[in-house]
Amino acid sequence: MSKGITSRKDDYSQWYNELVTKADLAEHSAVRGCMVIKPYGYSIWEKMQAALDKMFKDTGHSNAYFPLFIPKSFFSKEASHVEGFATECAVVTHYRLKNDGNGNIIVDEDAKLEEELIVRPTSETIIWNTYKGWIQSYRDLPILVNQWANVVRWEMRTRLFLRTAEFLWQEGHTAHATQQEAVEEAERMLEVYADFAENWMAVPVVKGIKTPNERFAGALETYCIEALMQDGKALQAGTSHFLGQNFAKAFDVKFTSKEGKLDYVWATSWGVSTRLMGALIMAHSDDSGLVLPPMLAPIQVVIVPIYKGDEEFKAISEVADNLSRELKAKNISVKYDDRDTHRPGFKFAEYELKGVPVRIALGGRDLENGTAEIARRDTKEKETVSRDGLADRIENLLADIQKNIYQKAFKFREENTTEVNSYEEFKQVLDSQAGFVSAHWDGTPETEQKIKEETKATIRCIPLNNKQEAGVCIYSGKASTQRVLFARAY
């Protein structure tokens, strides 16, 4: 294939980097640490956005937009929050440029801001400052708001989609009258993320809570979904945070309850980002290119004509156009690639690289026999079938591909989740097989930190509804009541 990529077994990191660029998803920009998301990559993100946006609205949320810039003083109001983001903040100090007289553009030193502005790394502070003006009474609650935006977290070591200085995301920020409502909201949004990951992305996830060490800065509880990539590393695919009254207290957001009592509001925040693109790529793709679940594929079906002469091309095009109309009537996205600048073999390789779930080839013999050749991207199986009822057949095939991609990823996760009972066994599994390692932990941040320092493995989550069982911590030998999931992670 003209755009051959490195094998996953030879160099997984290189395979990923090449696949992102060669499949036309994204590329590095002139700004260090930032990426250009190309049209094909952005169209996948748009499908993710559309699905999630509907899920948010179906659960009662509305979209709003808040400023990109946040006054520095806002960050100092919530101590643990500022500590969590301080080292990643980009700071705006001046508001004007000038010509130095020698043809050079320089910063105008006389145009210094009275207060520096932070380019948002996340929006809790600016939003809670705003909510102070929106909330007076229990009648103003709940506020269920989501924002689609970009954020900046100054990263020195970057990788396309997985870790960039600027990335796209959504962030939900809700305000509630009671603790119970806020906790229920955080849990509800975790379920929304899990539903999206499994039923749209075809990525099985473990739902759980983060340890205090791994919690979002300023949260009382962080709920997460964790996915396993094909190299045995975990990837956090979404988080939902119960913020308690921390931000309400920091910004003095109070409300009068039904009983006439003044109290602080209860809060949540939750978000997923373009990091999901990285998860989608790494969970399913192979050495030939992307493998996209049909639910998120920009092109679900491609039709490639194979012809000799204009007459045959015209006849094939008529069949292709009719089939395209039938597929579009079923809300299936289809492309008829009638370019005469590329040979069929090139097109086959191109759409394989781009992960198009179903390819249909139509040739002269197919015209005579009333047939078409169908190739599915997930298994690479090909078969020649009758064109009668072909649209229905393809609709069923797409559903089967979606299911098969999920089952393959689920099987991989199950085969790469290992229970261990000693620290030696723990290290051996991490170094040989990787994946999720289920082990007893004594519950202390000190033990968690020592394991991280010695093995680079972190506690990905304490699974929800975790089975309670007596045991001893693999590191300290102290008593433990449950196993937690460790892994090396992105």
Image (spheres, rainbow, N blue to C red):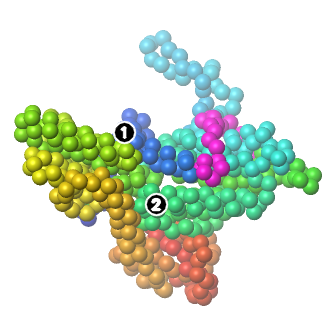
Residue 455 found in image quarter: bottom left
328 shown above or below 110: below
- Residue 335 x %, y %: 28, 42
Eyeballing the image, is 178 above or below 153? below
**Residue sitting at the far top:** 101
- Image quadrant occupied by the C terminus: bottom left
Camera sees residue 407: yes
Q: Nearer the viewer, mark 1 or mark 2?
A: 2
- C-alpha separation, residue under disc 1 versus residue under disc 2: 25 Å
Q: Which residue is mark 1?
A: 38
What residue do we see at 72% from left, 44% from top?
128
Question: What is the number of callouts on the image?
Answer: 2
Q: Where does the image place residue 255, in percent across and percent down from the top left?
A: 85, 48
Q: Earlier in the sequence, mark 1 or mark 2?
A: 1
The percent coordinates of residue 379 (x first, y second) are: 25, 63
Which residue does the image show at 62% across and 86% down from the upper left? 479
Q: Secondary structure at mark 2?
A: helix
User: Which residue is found at the position 27% from the left and 54% from the top?
Assistant: 389
Q: Mark 1 is on which residue type?
A: Lys
Q: Is residue 439 above or below residue 29?
A: below
Q: Position of residue 64 (x, y in %)?
A: 63, 39
Q: Residues within 10 Å of mark 2 (few under 14, many from 20)?
A: some
Q: Which residue is mark 2?
A: 199
Stretch of the chain drawn in magenta: 56-81
